[in-house]
Each structure stands twice: as C-alpha cells, then as structure tokens.
Image (cartoon, rainbow, N blue to C red):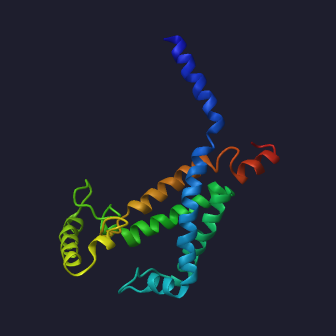
Amino acid sequence: MTAITSLYYRALDNLRHFDGLGPLALRLFLGPIFIFAGWKKITGIEDTIAWFGNPDWGLGLPMPELLGWAAALTEFGGGILLIAGLATRLVSIPLMITMLVAAFAVHWPHGWQAVADPSWLYANERVVESAERLARAKEILKEHGNYDWLTGRGSLVILNSGIEFAATYFIMCLVLLFTGGGRYVSADYWIARAQGRA
C-alpha cells in the first residue's frame, strides 16, 4: 500500500509542472466571450447606454453613460488581457463585478437556466410555461414552414436568459483571481520571473 501511495504522490508532484494549463484553459475560454460582448457594446454604445438607463424597457441603472462605457471597456479590454495572461488577477475583479451586475440587474428575474428546459432541476414557472410555447411554435413551423431545414443544425429552444452563464463566468473569474494566469503560459508568469518573483 505504501508503494502505491508513494507512486500516487510522485505522480501528483509531476503534475504541478502542468498546473498552468487549468488557468490557461479558463483564460482562452473566457477571453473571446468577453471580447465579443464588449465589442458589441462598444459598436452599439448608444443602444447600450439607452438600455442601461431606460427604466421602462431597459435596466434603469443610474449614470447609464458611465456604466455603459465601463461595462463595454471592462469586457473588451479584460478579454484581451485574459488571453494574454496579463494582469490576470487584477482584471478578474472588474470582470466579476460586471458579471454580478449582469446576474442581478438582467438575469435574476428569469431564474437559473440560460436555456429553458422544464425537465431540469431549477425549472421555474416561466420555464415550464415556455415548454407549451415551444410545442406550439413547433406545430406552426411543421404546418407552415420547412421544419426539417429549420432544425437541420439543431433543435429549437427557448432562451430563458437566467443567471446560469453570468454565474459560471463569475466563478471562472474567481478561480483566476486566486490562481493567476498560470505558470509558463501567461505574461504575468514571465514578468514575475524576470523580476525574480516566480
């Protein structure tokens, strides 16, 4: 048993040379998502500001111009920095704040699920009702549309817009806050190494 335990711990010790791969995977996953979201806000900044500020059909946030630009630049610039692994811990903080605002100001009323699935554990009344609407939409499309062509690349779904994605991105940024960009695979690592801190 001691030999197996020893082998196990030696294998774990050798794995630490690859511990930068986890943060790298998170950075390469999150970076493009944030860049795209930020770029959409930047290129449509007037619409973003209007949506942030309007209490009737938008979020009704105070200082919509400041918050609109802050969200857009945080996501766009933060995504670029994540991909490079530069200031990873620092940039994770405003990205987490952005995800908290998104979760509570935008997605909270819709529950947990991003895509409506009434069979799922977190299905709320809104999600359950969406199953009826989806079934009716499929009937209409089968009767009056080219249903096989429409579903040729995947099934039809209803977007529930719950907090699932915002919460997931928040948790991923939280992990990066504590792990950093990763050994060997981030600009942060090489800067720290050049300064004798790695």
Q: Is residue 115 left or right of residue 189?
A: left
**In the rendered picture of this protein, how many numbered marks are placed on residues?**
0
Residue, x 44% and y 56% (percent of image)? 168
Task: Relative to 123, say whether 45 is above or below.
Answer: below
Task: Relative to 36, say whether 9 is above or below.
Answer: above
Residue, x 45% and y 69% (percent of image)? 101
Q: Position of residue 67 (x, y in %)?
A: 53, 78
Q: Position of residue 178 (x, y in %)?
A: 58, 48
Q: Position of residue 166 (x, y in %)?
A: 44, 63
Residue, x 22% and y 56% (percent of image)? 119
Q: Position of residue 88 (x, y in %)?
A: 64, 56
Residue, x 62% and y 54% (percent of image)? 89
Locate residue 123: give its quadrant.
bottom left
Task: Relative to 31, say whether 22 is above or below.
Answer: above
Rendered-image quadrant of the C terminus: top right
Of residues 32 and 143, the one nearer the viewer is 143
